[in-house]
Amino acid sequence: MQSLAFRHGFWTRWFRRFNRFDLYVVLGFFVVAVAWQFGRWQGAYPFAFLSGDSANIAGFAAALDHPGNFTGDAILSDPANFRFYQTIHLPLIRALTKITGDYGTSFIWLLGWHVLVQAVGFYILGRILFHRRYWAALYAIMTLVPVQLNLEFWGAWSDPLPRFSFQALLPYLLAAALRWRSSPIAWPWLMAAAGVLVYVHPVSAPGWGLALWLGFVWGAPAAWSYQKKMTV
């Protein structure tokens, strides 16, 4: 009963903090996400305008479902050739294709959700960092601006690549880490969440996981021994 009361109190306080401005911000992000989605998709069906990593991911999903259709292909003819690639995109695309009937369309349909999830996530993170809704909204908008960084990128992109998926989920992990930075009991769960992100983008997750761990070590209670701090 006490646990239920705590949960009820927590969610009651949370919903009280959600006001009309928050609703308008989320609706605004939804409009941006829909516009970004249709600007890239443009209603093409089947959607065949994928290249590079996007085409590879959609191809992997198609080859897993229909290996017989890729006989003679140097890579897709044998799932063992790409079995190392295990990200959340493959099961998502395969599941969506049961609705769309087209792997390219299934892949590109993820784009708008990436924009919306990222914008809302950084708005939540901004609320924690700045304690002002206006600055949080501006912060979230700024994170959507596409920026090319050598071989990497940041911001809303043309395709929902794993790198984009990771940055869309990252603010939720950071917001949770800030929210429970003084609660060591929550740290293992946060580290586990960082570990799960390996299945979103294997390249980005280890670095952020290490940064999170170092932050917990730095913020560990002074009374803790060195050995205990290193095992948080």
Image (spheres, rainbow, N blue to C red):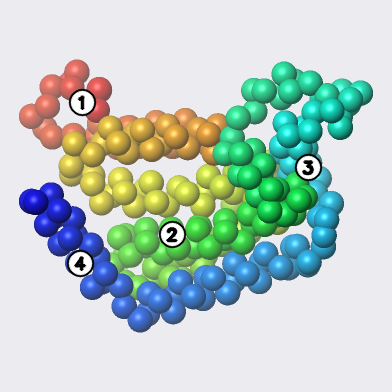
Residue holding disc 2:
122
Q: Is residue 63 above or below residue 129?
A: above
Numbered disc in front, either 2 or 3: 3
Residue holding disc 3:
55
Depth check, front residue: 52 or 151: 52
Q: Residue at x 74, y 23 (%)?
A: 79
Residue holding disc 4:
12
Percent position (x, y) of residue 37? 67, 64
Residue kind at label 3, given as amino acid type: Ala
Q: Label 4 vs label 2: CA separation? A: 22 Å
Rendering quarter of residue 59: top right
Asked if the residues shown at circle 4 and circle 1 are in contact, with their CB atoms under 8 angstroms apart, the answer is no
Q: Label 2 vs label 3: CA separation? A: 29 Å
Q: Residue at x 72, y 54 (%)?
A: 100
Numbered disc in front, either 2 or 1: 2
Task: Categorize mark 4 by other alpha carbons within 10 Å: few (<14), some (14-19), many (20+).
Answer: few
Where disc 3 sits, the SS reads helix
Where disc 1 sits, the SS reads helix
Residue kind at label 4, given as amino acid type: Thr
Residue kind at label 1, given as amino acid type: Lys
Q: Label 4 vs label 3: CA separation? A: 45 Å
Q: Label 1 vs label 3: CA separation? A: 44 Å
Task: Categorize mark 2 by other alpha carbons within 10 Å: few (<14), some (14-19), many (20+).
Answer: many
Depth check, front residue: 136 or 32: 32
